[in-house]
Image (spheres, rainbow, N blue to C red):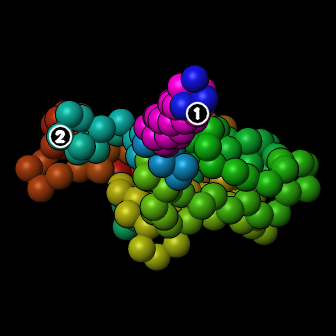
């Protein structure tokens, strides 16, 4: 009888040990999610906020800004009333996972550290206050693989070319190709009409 009691207790201990090991082993199955995994590719999110791309990743046009100078076809200009408006536009181009500082009427600089879905760094995008009439400029660190945009300049609307605001600039923003067609495949276009 004593022997059965010992055997019963030993069997109970072995079952509890086996169950504990099983639960421990199963809990690690849920750890497949890398702690650095993200929902967004920040550089891709930023690029798509600025540019319309075709299925092959070619530039179709810009969603924001205007090219003002033929010699700088990747430099976009945007008219704003103040630095807070410029900073809010900049923040809207970032994925929800990018952490920026507070946006206030006196903001002078914002820095966006970009990362891919695995958490690997993709570079840095800077928002820096300018001097009148330049409200602020957006640039990327060297090594950032940003395509189709080299710089974004926020200008005071009152200093916008021809003082006409955003609407009627009379400037053709088609980049023009060697085949004489503009960005949208329209017959050759001239700059600065």
5 sits left or right of 82 in the view? left
Towards the viewer: 98 or 81:
98
Q: Is residue 173 magenta?
A: no
49 sits left or right of 78 in the view? left
Q: Residue at x 55, y 49 (%)?
A: 35
| SS assignment for the magenta stretch, majority | helix
Contact, mark 1 vs mark 2 (Cβ under 8 Å) = no
Q: Residue beneath label 1, please?
A: 6
Q: Residue at x 84, y 50 (%)?
A: 102
Q: Is residue 10 magenta?
A: yes
Q: Residue beneath label 2, please?
A: 56
Towards the viewer: 137 or 168:
137
Neighbours of disc 2 within 10 Å: few (<14), some (14-19), many (20+): few
Q: Position of residue 79 (x, y in %)?
A: 66, 45
Q: Position of residue 170 (x, y in %)?
A: 47, 39
Q: Residue at x 69, y 51 (%)?
A: 99
Towards the viewer: 113 or 1:
1
Q: Report the magenta residues as a range.
A: 4-31
Neighbours of disc 1 within 10 Å: few (<14), some (14-19), many (20+): few
Using the numbered discs, state the Cα–Cα distance from disc 1 to disc 2 in whole angstroms.
73 Å
93 sits left or right of 156 in the view? left
Q: Is residue 90 visible?
A: no
Q: Is residue 22 above or below residue 43?
A: above
């Amino acid at each position: 009888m004593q022997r059965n009691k010992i055997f019963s207790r030993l069997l109970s201990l072995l079952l509890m040990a086996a169950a504990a090991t099983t639960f421990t082993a199963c809990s690690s199955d849920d750890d497949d999610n890398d702690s650095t995994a993200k929902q967004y590719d920040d550089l891709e999110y930023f690029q798509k906020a600025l540019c319309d791309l075709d299925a092959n990743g070619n530039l179709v046009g810009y969603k924001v800004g205007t090219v003002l100078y033929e010699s700088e076809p990747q430099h976009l200009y945007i008219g704003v009333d103040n630095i807070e408006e410029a900073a809010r536009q900049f923040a809207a181009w970032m994925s929800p996972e990018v952490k920026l500082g507070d946006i206030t009427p006196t903001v002078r600089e914002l820095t966006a550290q970009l990362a891919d879905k695995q958490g690997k760094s993709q570079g840095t995008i800077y928002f820096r206050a300018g001097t009148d009439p330049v409200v602020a400029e957006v640039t990327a660190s060297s090594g950032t693989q940003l395509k189709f945009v080299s710089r974004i300049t926020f200008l005071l609307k009152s200093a916008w070319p021809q003082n006409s605001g955003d609407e009627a600039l009379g400037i053709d923003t088609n980049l023009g190709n060697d085949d004489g067609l503009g960005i949208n495949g329209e017959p050759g276009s001239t700059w600065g009409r």
